[in-house]
Amino acid sequence: MGDGPLNGRPLLHIDALYKEYDNPATLVLDKIGFDLFAEDFLCILGPSGCGKSTLIRCIAGFERYEGTIEIDGKGVTGPGSDRIMVFQEFNQLFPWKTVIKNIMYALKINGIKDREEARGRAELYLEKVGLIDYRDYYPHQLSGGMKQRVAIARAMALKPRIVLMDEPFAALDAMSRNQMQDELLRIKEGEGMTVLFITHNIQEAISLGNRIMVMGRKGNIRESMDNPLKKPITPASEGYSEMWRHLNQMLRDGS
Amino acid sequence: MNKKLLSQLAFIIAALLLWQLLYNMKIWPKMLFPSIPTIGKAIVEAFTKRGLPAMALHSLKLLVSGLCIGVFLAFILSSLFSINENMAAVYNMIVCMFDLIPGIALIPVAILWLGIGDEAIIFMVIHSCIWPMSRSIIDGFKAVPKIYVEVGRNFGLNGIGLISGVYLPASFERLFSGIKLGWARAWRGLISAEMVFGGSALGIGYYITDRRTNLDIAGIFATIVVIVLIGLIVEYGIFRIIEKNTVAKWGMVH
């Protein structure tokens, strides 16, 4: 938990991560560094354009970068199923496969060749996100929230070292969003997942993260803190409003 | 029966009635403008006495072989030339140049290079479908949403796995319209070629030329009707069903 290494090596180690886009030359990530330990739930808050999406894409292996990104001490050189990404877009499921086949296919690629074993595992995780009755639906027959749940189930079924979530609930309505947050927390606790969660929503960061990081407009980390509030966290929780105000101030100040 | 089908049937009946009406008005000589019953009789005759089904099957056999080779080659070439951007630009130019050559203009080349056997006809069919198919592959792959590719790579897919697991299904709609366009062009190319030189066995293109030399106008129209029927069967009996079970089921067309 927190910044203190409980059992030695961090799961994710980032150091002096630097990224700029050319044309026009823009600095996106300015020598960022932080560690993530097993079962951490780190929420990264930042204004739009602060580079938080680029950060998570670098970790996922989709972007070239300078500096160090290591998973279990091994440098990240490209995408891999030890870091499964849950995207913001609803169409991250393959439309040509049913819900369960989407998950089974991902499992098959990752070495689970036995169909029954893959089916069993897919059903287990569909059960966890409450969509077992929709296993034979095609993605276009599901609502946005349901699609995100399938994407989460698919990510968990692959048992990655770390789940990367890039604003997965940002396109949902407020009610589904709250519901999804509760579900994600419940599942995360049950599975002992390690999660890195990008958001620009302060409430979301406070409710979900046991750690919160705030990024500034210049691709820097402005603050990294442990979340002292006791779960379940609601706006009525003690200390919530102080925390909200503090984070809000940070976001407003920008740099 | 649904309303669309009823309207389509009504149109066909109206067209037949109009034809027959024109025939009854005796504007043109019978030799040039046969009656509907005569054409019907010619169709029956073509099937029972003159062996048109065997000829049509022969033509379709050549067509399917040529289509398969053409589509396969289109995939190979499009993949080979997509290694880098310069190669892709070259292939794009090749496709633009060759797609413009009407099949019939290549018949002399086909005859001189390959003789007047089946090879020449298959050559014509390949030419008709390989270029539109290549276009569909190139455009289709380009239009695959980035997110599917990233999700696939995230799972650990790359190279061939990424192409067969993501690019092919994600661009299926365009690939399929390429196949439809390829089939339509190939069918035309094939009939023109058969009309000019026939091939190893007699095909449907030969039949229509043969009817002309016999001054059998009803037989000519009968062949045209059969050509149209084959087209309808392929469209409604094959293509529509494939569409219903793929892109329509996947919600990729609306």
Image: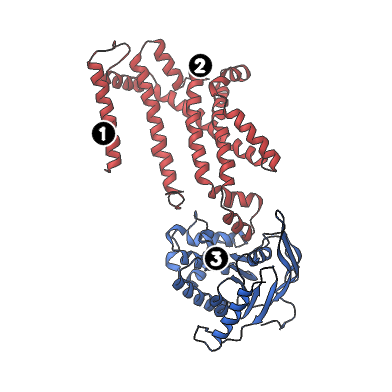
Cα separation, mark 2 vs mark 1, equals 37 Å
Residue A141, located in which quarter of the rendered image? bottom left
The secondary structure type at the circle numbered 1 is helix
Q: Which of B215 and A9 is in front in this view?
A: A9
Which of the chains bears the disc numbered 2? Answer: B
Residue A30's quadrant in the figure? Answer: bottom right
Number of other residues with Cα within 10 Å of mark 1, as a class: few under 14, some 14 to 19, many 20 or more: few
Horizontal side of residue B204 vs A156, given as left or right:
left
Say above or below: A125 vs B73: below
Residue at 72% over, 57% down:
A25
In the rendered image, residue A243, in percent from the top left (x then y), is placed at: 58, 83
Q: Is mark 2 on a helix, strand or loop?
A: helix
Colour used to depict chain B in the structure image: red
Mark 2–mark 1 CB contact (< 8 Å) = no
* Secondary structure state at the residue bearing disc 3: helix
Q: Name the subunit of mark 3.
A: A
Q: Residue at x 68, y 75 (%)?
A: A222
Q: Please report the residue visible at 63 percent of the width from the left and 57 percent of the height from the top.
A: B153
Q: Mark 2 points at which residue?
A: B196
The N terminus of chain A - image quarter: bottom right
Q: In which quarter of the image is the C terminus of chain A?
A: bottom right
Image hue for chain A: blue
